[in-house]
Image (spheres, grey):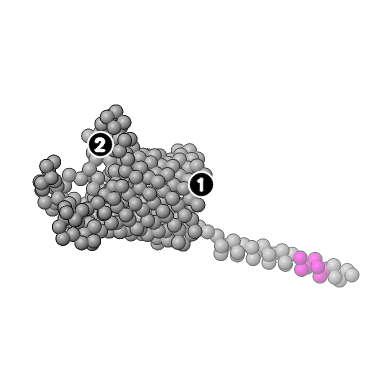
Amino acid sequence: MRKYLSLIALIIPVLGYTQDDLLSEIDTIKADTRVESAFKSLKIVNLESTKLAAKGDFYFVVAHRFDYMKNGFDDFFGLDNANTQLKFIYGLADWLTIHVSRSGFQETYDLAAKYRLQNQKEGGFPFTIAGFNSVAVNTEMKEENYPGMKFTNRLSYVTQVLVSRKFNERLSLELAPSYFHENTVRDIINDNGTVAVSDPQDNSQFAIGMGGRYKVTKRWSINMDYAAHLNRSSASNYTNPLSIGVDLETGGHVFQMHFTNSRAMHETGFLGQTNGRWDDGEICFGFNLLRVF
C-alpha cells in the first residue's frame, strides 16, 4: 500500500506540470491579438469605415439629408426637403460585406462590397485595411436631355482603400485614398436651361478621404470626415464634403446625427458632386439610423 501511495505522489506533480504546460500552449496558440473595431458604425459620416458586418448579420439603414439650413423658416431650416436613402447590408462572411441601396439624390441605385484585407493587431500590424468597391446607376438622367444615351452612360464606379488605426479606447482615425469614374459628367447649365460651360471635368477622378471618431462617453462619440478632390476642374462649381456629427449606441442599433455640406449619400455623389459651402451657410442636417437583425 505504501508503494502505491509513493507512486501516486510521484505522478500527481508530473500531471499537474504537464497540464499547466499544455494549457499555457493552448492559450498561446488561440490568443487573438486582433484589435477591436476602430469604429462602431459601418460609416464614419459619409465615408465608409473599416468596420464590416459580422457573418449572417443583416442591417437595414434609413438615412436622411435635409436641405440647406440657410433659408430659415421658409422651408423650416431645410426639413421640408428631405433626400432619403434606404440601404440593405448583409455580412456574407466575417471578411466580406455587401450592400444595395436607393437614394433620392439623382434617383440613384448602388451596389457595393467591402472586404477586410488586414486587421490591426496588438503588438503587431498597426492598421486595419479594407477595400471598398461600388457601382451606381443614375436613373434621373432622361433620354430627351441626352439624345443617344445608353445604359452605360448612367453608371459610375468607386474604388477605395480604407486604412484605420485605433490609437486607444477613445480615438480612431482613418485615411481613404479613392478613385472614382463617372461615365457621364454634366455640363454647367444656366437658369434658362442652356449650357453655360461644357464640363471639362475628367471622367476619372481622385480624392483622399480622412475621418475620425472620438469617444466621449460609453455610448456617445464625436465623428468627423472630409474628402479632398485631387483633380477637380477649375470650372467646376462643386466643392469638398465636410461632415461633423455624433454617434449614439443604443443596443441593437446606432443612431448617427450630423451636419454636412453634402446632400448626396452614395460615393460618387458626395465625392464629386457636393455643392454646399460651409462659409455660405449651405449646411444641412442629416441622420443615419442603423438596425441590425
Per the rendering, the mark at residue 208 is none
Mark sitting earlier along the chain (2/1): 1
Quarter of the rendering containing residue 50:
bottom left
Element marked by disc 2: loop
Amino acid type, mark 1: Gly
Q: Is residue 234 magenta?
A: no
- Give the residue displayed 59% in from the left and 61% down from the top: 27
- Under circle 1, the secondary element is loop
Residue at image mark 2: 282
**Neighbour tally class for label 1: few under 14, some 14-19, many 20 plus, Cα within 10 Å:** few
Looking at the image, which residue sits at the far top? 73
Image spot of residue 263 (x, y percent)? 29, 43
Extent of the magenta region: 6-12
Q: Position of residue 250 (x, y in %)?
A: 50, 42
Q: Position of residue 108 (x, y in %)?
A: 29, 52
How far apart are the alpha carbons under marks 2 and 1?
A: 33 Å
Dominant secondary structure (helix, strand or loop) of the stretch shown in magenta: helix
Residue at point 45%, 52% (across, down): 59
In terms of depth relative to the viewer, which is nearer, 5 or 87?
A: 87
Type of amino acid under label 2: Glu
Q: Is residue 51 above or below residue 280?
A: below
The answer to whether 77 is drawn above or below residue 2 in the figure is above
Disc 1 target residue: 252
